[in-house]
Amino acid sequence: MSSQLDKPARVQAMFTRIVRRYDLMNRLMTLGRDQAWRQLTARELRLDGPAPRVLDLATGTGDIALAIARQYPNARVIAADFVRPMLQAAQLKSRERGSPVRDFAQGDALSLPFADATFDALTNGFLLRNVADLGRALREMWRVVKPGGRVACLEITRPGAPVFRQLFQLYFYRVVPVIGRLIGGDAQAYTYLPNSLTDFPRAAQLRRMMLEAGFREARYRLLGLGAMALHIATV
Ligand SMILES: C[S@@+](CC[C@H](N)C(=O)[O-])C[C@H]1O[C@@H](n2cnc3c(N)ncnc32)[C@H](O)[C@@H]1O
């Protein structure tokens, strides 16, 4: 119980420490696949209104927010995170790349600083394992999106196929912490990463939790040989 209470502080401190090498570690750990998954996350929103408002929650260094802005030039993208140095990195990246993403907000996924039905769509990548109360985070996403709007959640999942599952476990639990120590410069963060998946719901269960949170439909696609899940839900 106390570890759940401490979790936000621990997660904030950890993401503050790893900002500098965060993008490099993502490219290395996913063998360069991570940006394609983020592009797909943006694509699954299928935005078609004249000026949709989209929240990229837990934006980190901003890659999903930037992907949304590229794919939907009419969208107004707001990027939020509860770690200020991550937001600063996202802001800098947006400026350097000439992206139109200009709205950044500091906020906690468990208590979003937005009114009900503010957004036409919402994304998050690699957030859900990190929250202390998953059901509450899902309800908050549901709350801030307008009826009919889409929420797309990209997250690591435990692969089902037996042979690949063993290979994945070897890689994720043994190799990733070593890469994290040698290149990411933070052994603790990259030991936390695999451990955060151990008790995380499987993709089918996460879909059920989305429905329980109020979404009227939810589906998921498996990516990365089944090690990644993209859930798409409708409010
Ligand atoms: C693994 S990073 C993912 C960043 C980005 N979405 C991406 O695709 O690379 C997780 C991010 O979630 C943020 N985060 C974790 N818990 C959060 C919470 N409760 N509220 C807001 N942001 C949170 C962290 O600060 C971090 O930037």
Image (cartoon, grey):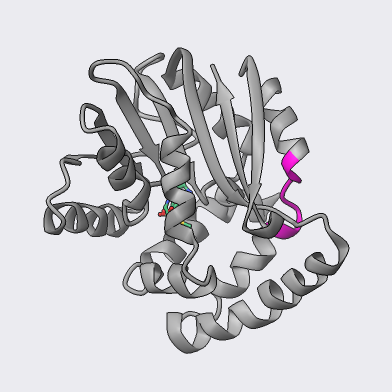
Q: Residue at x 76, y 57 (%)?
A: 159
With respect to residue 19, does 86 lie above or below?
A: above
Residue found 80% across the figure and 65% down from its top: 165
Residue 61, x across and y down, in percent: 32, 57
Say if the magenta span includes residue 64. no
Foreground residue among 129 and 108 = 129
Relative to residue 37, is residue 72 depicted above or below? above
Residue 45 x, y percent position in the rendering: 44, 29
The quarter holding residue 219 reads: top right
Relative image position of residue 38 (x, y in whole percent): 44, 49
User: Viewer-proximal residue, 90 or 224?
Assistant: 224
Q: Quadrant of residue 198?
A: bottom right
The residue positioned farthest toward the right in the image shown: 162
Can you see residue 217?
yes
Q: Nearer the viewer, residue 36 or 159?
A: 36
> On the rendered structure, is 19 left or right of 173?
left
Q: Measuring 36% from the left and 39% from the top, which residue is drawn there? A: 107
Task: Tell me the magenta residue range.
Answer: 197-203
Q: Residue furthest top?
A: 147
Q: Position of residue 223 (x, y in %)?
A: 62, 51
The residue depicted at 30 percent of the width and 38 percent of the height is: 71
| Observer-nearest of 193 and 30 | 30
- Extreme residue toward the bottom, this view: 182
